[in-house]
Image: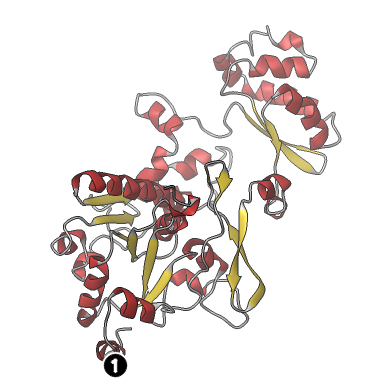
Amino acid sequence: MSLPKNQLLAGFTICDFTRVLSGPYCTRLLSDLGAEVYKIEKPNEGDEIRHIVPQMEVDATDQSAYFVRVNAGKKSIALDFTKPEALQVVKDIVLQSDVVVENFSPGIMAKYKLDYESLKTIKPDLVYCSISGFGQTGPLKNLQAYAHLINAFSGMMELERDVTKPPRVSNLQVADVLAGAHAFGLVCAALLRRSKTGQGAYLDVSMLECLICADDVNFSALLNGHEAHRMPRASMIIHPVGEKHIAMQLGGAPGMWEKLARIMNRSDLIHDERFSTGPARRKNWPAVLEIVHAWLDTFQSVQDVLDLLTPERFPAVPMMQPEEIIEHPHLHFRKAFTTLAHPKREEGVRITAPPFHIDGDHLPPPQSAPWKIGQDTMEVLENLLHYDQEKINSLKLNGLI
């Protein structure tokens, strides 16, 4: 019997201690494929990103669009695990779980006896994943980690800047997403091993190392005694044409320069010694740019250029604005955006859909996000943990839920 496309991980339960992006991105992917994810949030506070703008309900302060995107399909449990009296409740949830995912600074979970070494004593086959900025070991393990800081420390900010200009801040949270995606893959692999051996696993994912691995072109060169490819990087072109910019790729596959020379009606450039090989073009890149820019300047619009390049399968696209992307017909065809139901928004909340298709089709929209902190606490205590009302009342009285 085959499972529905969004139920490949049905039957697995995730105890989710994560906040912000790297961890929630991992557990969102697990939820997208059918795992039951229980998100542990501090009562009255919740995940920090609940409280940023824009909010999805008038006068709300705990329903940011950002939070909704990475926590769709999860259930929220309000539980203050920093209090010793709550430890047994957490352990009861772990006993019902296959996986724990956390992205606190190293040492925080051990402080509350919720680290892997503590929890594997009650559940030996537990798969436990820790995501952090710099990893769980090493002299920098306790440094604070934000995407901007990882971008700077990893060397990526330097590699991506134009060497003729000062460094610039990047808004891309690539390190978080890469770490979350790597953690997702590792968790799935660990669950597969457990299904064969019964063995649990401890997984240590570093945002820094994930980001470094994303630029193997440069680091493989540096590690073997060669120079990195600095910006502006030979083979990559961005140039204004009319009211937009065009992006072109002049390297990465054989024959591109020759193809472009013919499109430009400049076959003489093919045998010009300054441009006849890749190394020669890199050495004379300013001259290459001057020629290509002059050709592009003869056009009225980016589309006019693309009408010549696209039929010849020469790699080029327009530089898009984000506002254009969310309405682009290609992404609508791919169903790259989806809508979650919201109790007070008739139009729902639009979010990005899972970035993959299975068996030739997109996944159906995920279940709604946990709009309120701890909205599923009672359901979990009663139906998952089978606590009686007396015990639940005691937890409330002591401010643990």
Q: Which residue is mark 1?
A: 397
At x 58%, y 56%, the residue is 352
**Is residue 46 depicted above or below 172 in this figure?**
below
Taking the image as shown, residue 328 lies to the left or right of residue 337, namely right
Quadrant in the picture for residue 99: bottom left
Task: From this view, report whether residue 158 is shown above or below residue 201.
Answer: above
How is this picture coloured?
secondary structure
Residue 52 drawn at (x, y percent) = 53, 71
Q: Is residue 46 visible?
A: yes
- The amino acid sitting under disc 1 is Leu
Is residue 169 at all visible to an observer of this figure?
no
Which one is nearer the viewer's eye here, 296 or 201? 201
Secondary structure, mark 1, is helix
The spot of residue 102 in percent (x, y) is 32, 61
Picture coordinates of residue 13, whole percent (x, y): 33, 62
Pointer 1 local density, CA inside 10 Å: few below 14, some 14–19, many at least 20: few
- In this picture, residue 200 sits left or right of residue 302: left
List the single residue furthest toward the front. 1
**Residue at 63% across / 24% down in the picture?**
250
